Each structure stands twice: as C-alpha cells, then as structure tokens.
Amino acid sequence: MRVGTGVRTTHRHFGGQNVYRVAYLYRLSVLLLLSLLTGSTSAMQAPLSHSTARSWRAELTQSWDVLGPFPIHAREQHFLSPSFPINVAEPINFTSTWPSAYADNGRVGWTKTQASPQGDLSISFRNIRWTDLRATEGWAALQHHAVLHTNLTIYPPPGANGASPAPRLLVQLIQGSYITIVPASVGSVSSSPPEWHAGNIYEMERTLPRAIELPTPPSSTGPTTYHVFVSGDYEIRLFGDPKRNAPTQSIKLTIDVEEPSDSAVLEPTQDVLCDFLDGFAFGDALGLGVRSRGGWWTVSDAVLASKSDGFDVELLRNTTIAPSQTRIVPLHIVQTAPFRKSTLTIKLTLSSETQTKPLTLSASLPVKHLPAWSTNNLSAIMGSYFYAQEMPTLFVAFPPLLDNIKNQNSQPPILCLHGAGVDIVSSSMMIDSLAPQQHSWLVTPSGRTPWGLDWHGPSAKEAWNSVDALVTIVAANPAWHARQLTAGTPVVLMGHSNGGQGAWYLASRFPDRVRGVIPAAAYVKSQAYVSLSMSRSGHFIDPAARAILESSLTPDDNDLFLSNLVDTPVLAIHGGNDDNVPVWHSREYLSVLQTWNPDANVTFREDARQPHWYPSVLKNAQVQAVLDNILQASTQRHPRSKIFTLTVAVPSESGSLHGWKIERLSVPGRLGRLTVHTLADNQLRIVTSNVDRFSVLGDAWEGFASLQVDNSALEISPELLNSDVVTFESDGRRAWKISAQNLKAPSQVSARIQSFLSTTAPFRLIVLDNTSSRDTSLALRIAHDLNVYHRLDAEIILGYEAFQDQLASGITGNILIIGDAASPALAKLLENPQTSFRAENNRLAIRDATFDEAGLGILFLHPHPQNADAQMLFLLSTDASGLERAGRLFPIRTGVTVPDWVITSSRADQVGAAGVVGAGVWGTGWGWNEAMSWLY
Ligand SMILES: *[C@@H]1O[C@H](CO)[C@@H](O)[C@H](O)[C@H]1NC(C)=O
Ligand SMILES: *[C@@H]1O[C@H](CO)[C@@H](O)[C@H](O)[C@H]1NC(C)=O
Ligand SMILES: *[C@@H]1O[C@H](CO)[C@@H](O)[C@H](O)[C@H]1NC(C)=O
Ligand SMILES: *[C@@H]1O[C@H](CO)[C@@H](O)[C@H](O)[C@H]1NC(C)=O
Ligand SMILES: *[C@@H]1O[C@H](CO)[C@@H](O)[C@H](O)[C@H]1NC(C)=O
Ligand SMILES: *[C@@H]1O[C@H](CO)[C@@H](O)[C@H](O)[C@H]1NC(C)=O
C-alpha cells in the first residue's frame, strides 16, 4: 500500500488543508534529532519540486499480524508494556502461544488480518465466546488488549546517490493506544528500547500527524524495512457496546514521510479566531498554528498585511518552536473601530539562530461576521479569550432573548457541558440542543477538546474561565451592555453524557457558585461505568498499594461528593433505554443524594424507552419550568439545611458550601469532611474529619451566638463577626483555634499527578541533558500530546543552563523536568530537598531507599520555584526503558492511577501497576505522608 508519496497523502483530513507536501530537498544528513537541534548547516530555500520521483516514499504492508485478546482494565496499557505480552526488542516467534483467560483452553497465538488500502483496520476475535464472558462479567469482559504488527518499507528517491537527507515519518494512528517503529533486524543491531508514541485514541478533530524519527537511517540506495507495532485496546468508551457481535476495534494507521528542513510552515487547522459582531471581535484572543519542519524558530513579530483603522493585532509573547513541534502563536486583538473585511491576513516574522535571514509567513483567516443584535435576530456566537494567560481558547454562547435594560438584574448564565467527542468548534449540536432564555446567556465551553479531561482539571477550569471571559467581553463594548452579566456570576449547570457527569462534578465541587443543575445521561465515575474487575495488575498487586494508587481517582468519584448538593436544586434526566450510559447511574445519584438528605431538592425524569441522546433531552417543558424556578430564585443563596456536610478531596480544586471552605487536609489523599449543625438557640456545632484548616465567610454565620468545633468551644468576638473571612486552624487532636485573618497560606496544589495539567501559563518542558535525543524526543511527544488531548501549550527548553536563564526572567506556569536519575544537574536542582526525594551519590533516594536498578521510571510532583499556585513534575529514569515507562504515566488521559509520586519498574511490562515499587501522596506542605505511602 502506498500510504504516502511526495505530493499526495492518503491520511484523513480534519477539515483542513493538506499541508504535508514532502519534496523539499535541501539539507544533508540530518539523521538524528540531535543534529537537527544543533544543526548549523545554512539551508537554502529550494523551490518546491513537483516531481515525486525526487522524494522518499513510505509503504505500509496491508497484511497485519494480530496477537490477543488479553484481559485488561481501561487505561492499564499505560502501566503495562504496550506490546504486552511480547518484547519487541527480541525476535518475534509468530508460532508461539501465550496464556489468555478469554480463550478456549486458555492460550492465544498470532493470527492475520488485512487493512484497507486507506489504512483502516478492523480487529476482532471471533473464536472467543464473548457472550459467555459478558454474561457474568458484563462490559468489563469486553475490554481487551492486542498487539498488532506489520511492515513499513522506506524507499529512497529513485536515482538518489546517497545525498538525500533521511526523512521523518508523519504518523496518524487513530483509535490505537501506542505505536512504535523498530528496525527489522531486531535483536542484532538495535539494543535500544523502542520509543512508544501515543495514538489519537479519541479520533480528536484537527489533529496533526505526529512526527516520528526513524530508529535507524534508511538506506539511500535501496528499500529499508521496519517493524511497526501497535497497541490495540478495546474500551467500551471508545467503541461502544458491540451488542451481540464480537467487540471490534476500528483503528486507522497512515504513514507519510517528510524531509526535515530548516523552515517553518503554517498549520491553519490549529488557528483560533472568534466571530465578529457588527464589526467587533467577540474576544481579544487570536491564535495561529505554526510548525517547525526543522530547526528552532522564534516567532518575534506579527503585523496585519494591510493596515486597518482602529483594528490591529499584537504578538502576545515571542514563541519558540522546537524542531517538528507545532505551537499556537498567541496574538492580542486591539480594536477601537469596526473591522468588516472577510479575511484577516497576518504576517508573522520568525527567526532562527541557524538562519541569517528571518522567515515570513502570511496567514489568512476567514472572518465570520454576525449582524448587530436585535430582539428578533440573535444567533450563537463564538468568543475567544486567553486560557492560562496565553492560550487562545474558543467558546460558543447564545445571548438572552431580551434586553436587560428595564429588568436591571440580569440572570445567571446557563453553563452547558458537551458529551465526549462533541466538538463545539465544528458543530453547533450542543448549543442547538438548548432552548434560548429570556434573560440568561447560554454558554458552551470547549472543554479544551471534545474529550479533554472529562470536565475535570483543566477542562473544569476552562468551563469557569469561559463564563468569566464572556462577562469581560460583553462589558468591553457599550453596544452589548443590554446583555451584560455580573462579574463572578453564579451559573446554572447543564450537560449531557460526559457533560452530565461534568455538571454533577462542577456543581458538587463548587456548590456556592451553582444555582441549580440539570445533568442528563450522566455516569457516576469511570470505575462504575466499566468495572476494573478484569484488571491484570489486580492479580499481582498488594491491595494496600492498589488503594494508594486508586486514591488518585478519589477526586473524580462524583458519588463521594453528593453531600455538597443537598441544598442545590437538581433535575436529573436519563433515557430509560440508554445503551451508552445505563440509566441506573442517574438513579444511583438520586439514591445517594437522598441518603444524605431525604428532603434534598432533587427531581428525576426518566424518559421511558428513550436512548442515550434524543433532541428533547435538554429542551422540554419540565426543563424550562425548573429553569424558570431556579432563575427566579437566583438572586439569593440556597436556603441552608439544618445539617449539611462539605466533602472535599483536593482543597485547591474545590469551592465553598454555604460559605464554608476546607482549606487544608490533615492527611492529603483521604477525604476531608466538615459537618455543620445548626442547633436551637443560635448555636453552631461543627464536626470535622481529616481537616487541618477551614474558613468561613463572615456573613455565613451572622446571627449565631456560639460555636463548638469538635472539642473546642469558641467565642465569636465582635472582631470575628466583622471580618470577611474567619479561619480555623487545628490546634492538637480535635482542638481548634480561630483567627480573624484570612490566612492566605496556599493550600497544597498537588493530590495526584493529574493536577500537573492545571497550569496557570504555558508549560515549560525542560530536558536536563541537552545532548540526550531520547529525552528530547519525550519532550516533543509530551508537547504533541498536550496539544492533541488538551490544547495546552508547551515550550521546550534544552539543558539545565537554559532552564536557569529562563528562571532568571521568571516562569509562572508548571514545569516538567525530564532527566536521568543520576544526572549532576538533577542533583543541583534537588540540593535543598523540598519533598522526600533527594539526590545522593548520583542516585535518587527517598527515605531509606535508593534507586539505581535498571528500568526504573520515577515521577514526582514538587513545589514550583517561583509560584506557590504552580508546581513542578520530575520525570526521571535510570535508563532509556525506564524513561519510556515514566513517559507513559504522564497524565494525558483520565483514569490512569498515579498519585503525587510513583516509581515503576521493568516488572510493570508484564504485571502492570503491580510493577510499581513505590507510590504515595505528599503530606501537608509536601512532606512525607506515612498513611498514604507505599514502598517496596
Ligand atoms: C517458536 O515457538 C514454537 C512453539 O512454542 C517452538 O516450537 C519454536 O521452537 C519456536 N521457535 C523459535 C525460533 O524459538
Ligand atoms: C514482514 O516482512 C517479513 C520479511 O520480509 C515477512 O516475512 C513478513 O511476512 C512480513 N509481515 C507482514 C505482516 O507482512
Ligand atoms: C520579541 O523578540 C524581539 C526580537 O528579539 C524583541 O524586540 C521583542 O521585544 C520581543 N517581543 C516580546 C513580546 O517579547
Ligand atoms: C438577521 O441575521 C442574518 C444573519 O445571521 C442576516 O442575514 C439578516 O440580514 C438579519 N436580519 C435582520 C433583520 O437584521
Ligand atoms: C426547589 O428549588 C426550586 C428553585 O430554587 C424552587 O423553586 C422550589 O421551590 C424548590 N423546591 C423545594 C421542595 O424546595
Ligand atoms: C548544551 O549545554 C551546554 C552548556 O550550556 C552548551 O555549552 C552546549 O552548547 C549545549 N549543547 C547543545 C547541543 O545545545
């Protein structure tokens, strides 16, 4: 199969242009990434050759070898070797068999399948008695892992006499977990462990192919063959319920080639631009996708191609792009007069240390103009703002039907969260499924991407930020003031499917900012959606270690936080015949909520015989009636029950309930609870569990005469009554002291590795050893994944010195450190240990354990050197295979169980999380946390 030629690609287009023309020939022997990074050859911009005869060609064999199925639970492939049970660094025996509990007689071997000429693969195992397995184990039994293998052949340009630079691969793997390319002469030449690259498992829109360097240079005189291995993992969440059929993985792989060259290109599919309303941009953020085809490029200027009175763009920040990296360059829109052209053309200036002449790229963006608002002519509008200071981000909103001039009090907006796979940028499905409101805005955030982080972490932050951005945008233009909102406005939450789950999540974590919640077709938590019972690691792991790993799921477990919703109006909706999220999930939400308070203001609407999605799910008379009630009552806080309990897992990711807020836990990793009893005679009694510090807003306890917290009777002095915030600090076992100060000591920002994604500014990915091509490759892989999965921006920095230079000018965002556990630079960074990890005689140590065994991958969160609201993540290893293991635990997807720190070993390749040799959650102030730690 020809998967890629010089001028034609067969990979799928994601609504964008085909920009991968690979006929530039102008640089010699840039075989390794390293030489790319340091290359000093001055390149000449050669004209585009239209002769395919001059370019490299990649050919994937259509026939595939398939090994499987093996039972695993969702996301277990991140701990296991993606090629489990085989080792691809050794010659493969295609006649051997391996144990598998799914197969008759308990063993499976290699079989063959055929891909379509377009690269579509359909993987199913029809000789497995799936019906019997699912009869007892349900969906958990359908989840499985398989290893897929084929050959890739690289042909040099015909007639080339060894002068053509080696190409890199541009790979699109859709719905596969991981891919690696290894030399065909396995076992003889390469002893280097394979580099695994994550696929686009969610088939996310507008995803660029991934650049992969060939593991060995191809021959420039004849064809060279490589092995391709893919980890194929069936998940109900990806492929759905197969009903009576065998579960079938639909994977697509296409591989193209590109010759590296010292240049940069625009990537228009990555551009970000808001709509214009009566000539005015609905937001101030604009983004332009730029990819380096080779060399380090810095975008240092941006100007309009033709001047426009009262309209301009400004580069927000000089943006440095690593070889093969794509970044979205942030531009600030400055506008004082209408702009009515149909395209916006912007010239970017890029410079490179290896090029004397700057490069100019000219980007043309189509502008969508909407007419001025009038009562009968309103439409959905796309707005933009900078997420995390510099990342241009879109949301879609629909204005209130009526002006608010007469009715001064605008009503809270309705924040509606989409389901998994729904792209608000290319489809209006979400906003169209809501009824416009008389006095309320409808806001549908992107969630970062169609999957994002299931509306937790950065996706949750983005949901709030989209509302705040809308407030700012509307306030900025007097013509829009009739539809103004109040800063910090509370919201009504709605959502469907994953977004229904997200609505429960946001409402129960930020109850004081939510006036009501209408979640539809929501699941409770991932482990309840498909159970982890067929886990491979579960057969090997110490349950005590498993408990610590799984504590990283606690912040996601919506059922545990329903105590926070006893006073919030809820209308839960679910189709009675939902075959995607079973209806029992919503019934269970109600059951749990009513256990906390039988009088909770919660209504359940089960739409008999309806499936997962139906057009009236969020648009019907009952929804409108409930919305009307909530919106009418929205100026006041909810009435407060006589007893209520605030439950918190991560204080830094949680808001207050009736003004009460848990600021710090005694044992991070365990749940914290605060129960407030209102007694007769204006007495308040508070009972805490695992709380070290909490606060209350002054007005929340107005009218109370006395206060008992656990064993402490506290006096409410006039000073306390008059202060805005009162803080309670633990003072011995179940004893408390009270303070009128708002102790703004930062709460712990960590809790699990995933919290690293919640950055306040673009990430810095630091490669400590600037000569390590594998470490640099991992940084590029992570930068690519951050963009694909979360539209989060990252800058790559090579070397300890370069990192120190950047620190000198200030870094606010989260910092990832990639390096060798024995590196002297690491020892310097850990000179004054701030966690329990220290560097000792070129070895990493924690407590009385030191780590120098081959194959270890080590991840730990660490305080940020300059910003108390940010953090660092160290991603270290004792060798290349350990680095690969650590890299797969970087928190790109939900449901991978990694707490604040983890050390994984080569045993994980076969036994998954049971190969972990240590893991834990940091204590208060980043200290050792005995209760939540496990060491081998
Ligand atoms: C491959 O596996 C088969 C079956 O286990 C065995 O008989 C054969 O010797 C193996 N071949 C090699 C080269 O190891
Ligand atoms: C891959 O190439 C080898 C060597 O030419 C061949 O024996 C094997 O059958 C090929 N595999 C597939 C899946 O085509
Ligand atoms: C970007 O770099 C240019 C040239 O190095 C410099 O003049 C300019 O001030 C920088 N701009 C920003 C926004 O940092
Ligand atoms: C209403 O809006 C549409 C485009 O959204 C526009 O074509 C039309 O002219 C507008 N009508 C009025 C009366 O403004
Ligand atoms: C539930 O909340 C709604 C909206 O605030 C309110 O109108 C209604 O009276 C409440 N019902 C009960 C039983 O408290
Ligand atoms: C790596 O860092 C050292 C020390 O700053 C520097 O001298 C060297 O040029 C750098 N090498 C590369 C490949 O960037």
Image: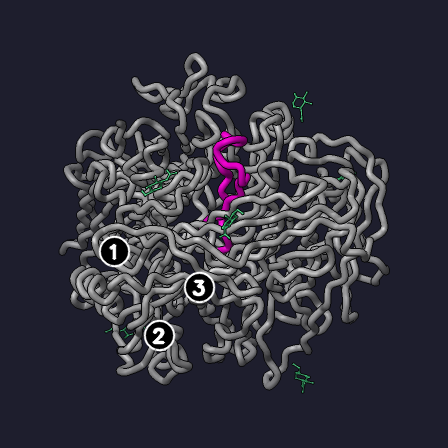
Q: Nearer the viewer, residue 477 or 256?
A: 256
| Amino acid type shown at disc 2 | His
State the image coordinates of residue 474 (x, y, percent, origin top left): 60, 66
Residue drawn at 49 percent across, 42 percent down:
196
Q: Secondary structure at mark 2?
A: loop
| Amino acid type shown at disc 1 | Ala
**What residue is shown with label 1?**
103
Magenta residue span: 177-200
Task: Give the number of the disc on residue 209.
Answer: none
**What residue is shown with label 2?**
612
Q: Earlier in the sequence, mark 3 or mark 2?
A: 3
**What residue is shown with label 3?**
122
Where is residue 781, by image quadrant? top right
Q: Is mark 2 within 8 Å of ligand 5?
A: no
Residue 61 in the figure: left or right of residue 317: left
Dot 2: within a 10 Å radius of its alpha carbon, few (fewer than 14), some, or many (20 or more) residues? many
